[in-house]
């Protein structure tokens, strides 16, 4: 039994194994004969709202032969204070796998420990591993490979998506640059623990210079709404706009994990000019997560 709890905890060879499978999953979607989740029921336990994550996992479970059971944390005893380990013990006796989207990373880790079933982190405040695996596949699809690429993340460099990019770069060996104000850069101890070719920059143009990929995420993540005013003010100047795109390599990918707030982290014109990349990236959540689920049970 395998889990995808974080990129930090997942060996590089397993990340590569998953990525190597995605292209086949996408290419053979209509004719896929292997159904590794046949006769299985997978629970989707969500404490946070979702569009792409929920739809892609529910469709993915069904296309792999299984059935999905959506459980909002507010509608089960977990939302009334039942310890996560007790919920895990119960569900582990009734379902075959769990996909969890929640706030605390420890909830995902504890669930995997006590449930005895394959567990996938569909987002926590600490990491978003499924998203970054999707993004790496998307880079491979458009540029032939993610190897030897320079990825520049612009915006809140300490958010869960940026942190997962840090671990991916450290494990897989590509260069990552983070363009963020000092107060939104990742902690020094995290960077030291990760190692790799990772650098932080206060000047977005300096970070974007010669990059293969420009990447951004929302400035106000779920759970940070009370900080919205200060965040929006501090992060002004860290948007992906036409001028920043011109600084990157010709033909550089512009990526956004969505939802996008046009006029904040990305301009309307840049998003629309790169809509094919960004919405292919969204579609690829389905194919990548199918490869992840298959990997957990094979």
Image: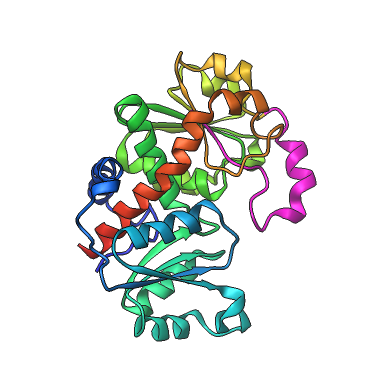
The residue that appears at 27% across and 73% down in the rendered structure is 39
The residue that appears at 35% across and 48% down in the rendered structure is 288
Query: Whole-percent x and y of residue 10?
Result: 31, 55
Task: Work out whether 230 lies above or below 265.
Answer: below
Query: Whole-percent x and y of residue 22?
Result: 29, 44
The answer to whether residue 250 is left or right of residue 224 is: left
Asked whether residue 195 is in view, the answer is: no
Residue 157 placement: quadrant: top right
Region rendered in magenta: 214-237
Residue at the extreme front: 30
Asked whether residue 209 is in view, the answer is: yes
Residue 241 placement: quadrant: top right
The residue that appears at 47% across and 52% down in the rendered structure is 128
Residue 158 placement: quadrant: top right
* Between 166 and 213, the one nearer to me in the picture: 213
The answer to whether residue 39 is left or right of residue 152 is: left
Counting every numbered tag in the picture gives 0
The answer to whether residue 71 is left or right of residue 238 is: left
The reply to whether the magenta stretch includes residue 178 is no
The reply to whether the magenta stretch includes residue 233 is yes
Quarter of the image where the N terminus is located: bottom left
* Between 128 and 36, the one nearer to me in the picture: 36
* Between 7 and 44, the one nearer to me in the picture: 44
Quarter of the image where the C terminus is located: bottom left
Query: Whole-percent x and y of residue 118?
Result: 32, 69
């Amino acid at each position: 039994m395998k889990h995808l709890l974080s990129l930090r905890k997942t060996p590089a060879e397993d990340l590569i194994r998953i990525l190597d499978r995605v292209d086949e999953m996408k290419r053979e979607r209509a004719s896929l004969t292997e159904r590794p989740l046949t006769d299985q029921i997978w629970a989707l336990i969500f404490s946070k709202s979702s569009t792409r994550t929920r739809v892609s996992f529910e469709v993915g479970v069904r296309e792999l032969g299984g059935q999905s059971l959506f459980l909002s944390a507010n509608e089960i005893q977990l939302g009334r204070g039942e310890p996560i380990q007790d919920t895990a013990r119960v569900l582990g006796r009734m379902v075959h796998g769990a996909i969890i989207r929640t706030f605390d990373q420890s909830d995902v880790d504890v669930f995997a420990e006590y449930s005895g079933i394959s567990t996938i982190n569909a987002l926590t405040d600490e990491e978003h591993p499924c998203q970054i695996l999707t993004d790496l596949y998307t880079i491979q699809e458009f540029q032939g490979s993610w190897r030897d690429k320079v990825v520049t993340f612009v915006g809140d460099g300490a958010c869960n998506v940026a942190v997962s990019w840090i671990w991916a770069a450290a494990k897989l060996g590509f260069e990552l640059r983070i363009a963020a104000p000092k107060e939104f850069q990742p902690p020094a101890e995290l960077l030291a623990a990760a190692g790799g070719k990772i650098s932080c920059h206060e000047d977005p143009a300096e970070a974007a210079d010669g990059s293969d990929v420009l990447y951004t995420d929302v400035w106000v993540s779920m759970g940070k709404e009370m900080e919205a005013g200060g965040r929006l003010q501090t992060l002004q100047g860290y948007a992906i706009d036409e001028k920043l795109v011109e600084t990157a390599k010709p033909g550089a990918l512009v990526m956004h994990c969505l939802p996008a707030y046009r006029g904040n982290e990305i301009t309307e014109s840049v998003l629309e000019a790169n809509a094919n990349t960004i919405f292919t990236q969204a579609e690829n959540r389905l194919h990548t997560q199918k490869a992840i689920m298959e990997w957990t049970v094979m």
